[in-house]
Amino acid sequence: MISFLDALYIVCCNFYRKREKGMFKISGLILLTATFEFNIVLATLILPKYYSEVLSLATVYKSRYYIIALSFMFFMSILYFRYFKITSYEEANDKLLSLPEERRRIYYFLSGLYIVASFLIPIVLAISIGRSHK
């Protein structure tokens, strides 16, 4: 059984596979980490809008940039350990390729959609928040 995280990693690696022959695995890992980081950025953009009175006093909100930087290092190290020490790209790719064609397409589609949405939604929200503060 393949996990959605493995499918995300495969899609991220395959994005770089033709461009970077020897480095596509680490580039895919960086892209996957950036995808999760943009989810955290999205949370830091949404939370103050709905919980501003609570978050304005909280130490967590004041140190949100440190939290983003630390979580990047955390995600990178956890994912590195997972895909370079525990399992590998080849194992995850073999699991994905062993699935029926229809199910594989669903994994590819949902993974691609998740990656694109993880980057676009925070950017669009940041632009709209920036325009509303002018």
Image (spheres, rainbow, N blue to C red):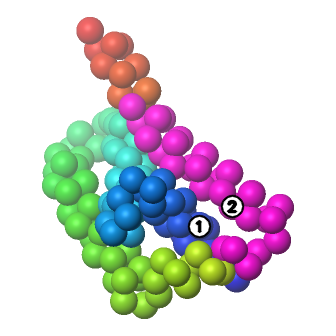
In the image, is residue 133 part of the stretch drawn in magenta?
A: no
Using the image, determine if residue 37 lies above or below residue 97. above
Q: Nearer the viewer, residue 74 or 92?
A: 92
Taking the image as drawn, is residue 119 in sight? yes
Tell me the tag on residue 7.
1
Using the image, determine if residue 71 lies above or below residue 82. above
Quarter of the image that includes the N terminus = bottom right
Q: Which residues are magenta?
A: 96-123
| SS label for mark 1 | helix
| SS label for mark 2 | helix
Quarter of the image that includes the C terminus = top left
Total numbered labels placed on residues in the image: 2
Which amino acid, mark 1?
A: Ala
Q: Which residue reaches farthest top?
A: 134
Task: Residue at 35% x, 28% y: name it.
Answer: 126
Using the image, determine if residue 85 lies above or below residue 44. below
Q: Which residue reaches farthest bottom?
A: 86
Task: Residue at 55% x, 84% y: name it.
Answer: 91
Tell me the tag on residue 107.
2
Q: Nearer the viewer, residue 56 or 80?
A: 80
Are circles 2 and 1 on residues that touch, CB within 8 Å?
Answer: yes
Task: Residue at 16% x, 55% y: name it.
Answer: 66
Which amino acid, mark 2?
A: Tyr
